[in-house]
Each structure stands twice: as structure tokens, then as C-alpha cells.
Image: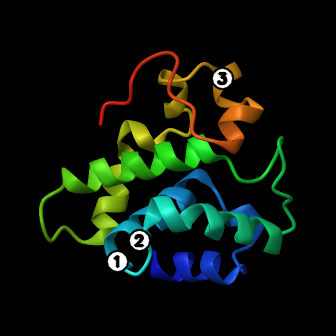
Amino acid sequence: MAALGAQVLGGVLPKAAWTHRAHLAVAVWVTAARPDIVPARDMPGIIRAYNVASGTANTDTGGYHETITLASLRAVAAFLSAQPHGMPPYAVCNALFDSPYGDKDWLLSHWSRDVLFSVSARCRWVEPDKAPLPF
């Protein structure tokens, strides 16, 4: 996780490796092991910078997505807080991958596709329109 996180911070992670699981693993690492990074404050800029470094433009239709990022960070923080103290980060990641959050479509239980993938939701936080988040 640390190596993956360092690659994202450095903008050198191959674009093909920036998968849903990689997003989750970096979120776990940042939340659990990087007290110098405030996830909700810092990850938007980190992701935008990574996107630019990997050739992805941050626009109204592509690149950084505010609602997905903030919902995912909240999910990871809630998941981490429910794990036993001292659980190794790799075990937390494996448990997270096996949880409902490991499914890249978990957000569609809370947002309709039209709302989640709207320009508004990409650019700013938009509340769920189907079901409230469980945390």
C-alpha cells in the first residue's frame, strides 16, 4: 500500500494500475498511515495532480470526481474505525475488498446513475438520492 500510495503521490503509477482496488488501498494508507494528509482536504488535489501526470484531464466529464472521492473516503474511514485496533493494513485492505465497498458499483445503492455521473456530482458533493450512506 505504501508503495502504491507513493506512486500516486509522485504521479508515476501507471494509469492502468489506478483501479477501484488501488483507489481503496491508497485511501486506507492515507487514512491510517499518513497523519500529515487530511484525506477530505488533500485527496482531491492529490487525485487531480495524479490525473494530470498520467494524462487524464480533470473536466466536467472526466478525471476527478468529488462525490465519488468524498463518499469513498467516508466509507474507508468508517470501515477502518470498525476494525480491531492493531489490525495490519494489508488485512484491513483485504477485508475492505471483501466488503460491499470492494464492489466498484457500491455507490449506485445510494445514488442513481444519472445523479452520480452528473456534472454537479463530479464538481461538488451531491447528497445521495436513493438511500442515505450508512455512516
**Residue positioned 57% across, 32% down in the render:** 126
**Residue positioned 55% across, 23% down in the render:** 111
Gap in angstroms between the C-alphas marked 3 and 1: 33 Å
Name the element at disc 3.
helix
Q: Which circle, 3 or 1, is nearer the viewer?
A: 3
Vertical relation: 109 (above or below) 46:
above
Q: Are marks 2 and 3 in contact (CB under 8 Å)?
A: no
Image spot of residue 71 (x, y percent): 48, 42
Q: Are marks 3 and 1 in contact (CB under 8 Å)?
A: no
Name the element at disc 1.
helix
Name the element at disc 2.
helix
Comes first in the chain, label 3 or label 1 = 1
Image spot of residue 75 (x, y percent): 38, 45
Numbered circles on residues, count? 3
Instruction: Determine whether, in the image, residue 39 is placed left or right of residue 135.
Output: right
Instruction: Determine whether, in the image, residue 86 is placed left or right of residue 116.
Output: left
Residue at the disc numbered 1: 33
Residue at the disc numbered 3: 115
What's the amino acid at mark 1? Ala
Gap in angstroms between the C-alphas marked 2 and 3: 29 Å
Residue found at the far left of this picture: 85
Residue at the disc numbered 2: 29
Vertical relation: 77 (above or below) 26:
above
| Mark 1 closeness class: few <14, some 14–19, many ≥20 residues within 10 Å | few
Vertical relation: 83 (above or below) 53:
above
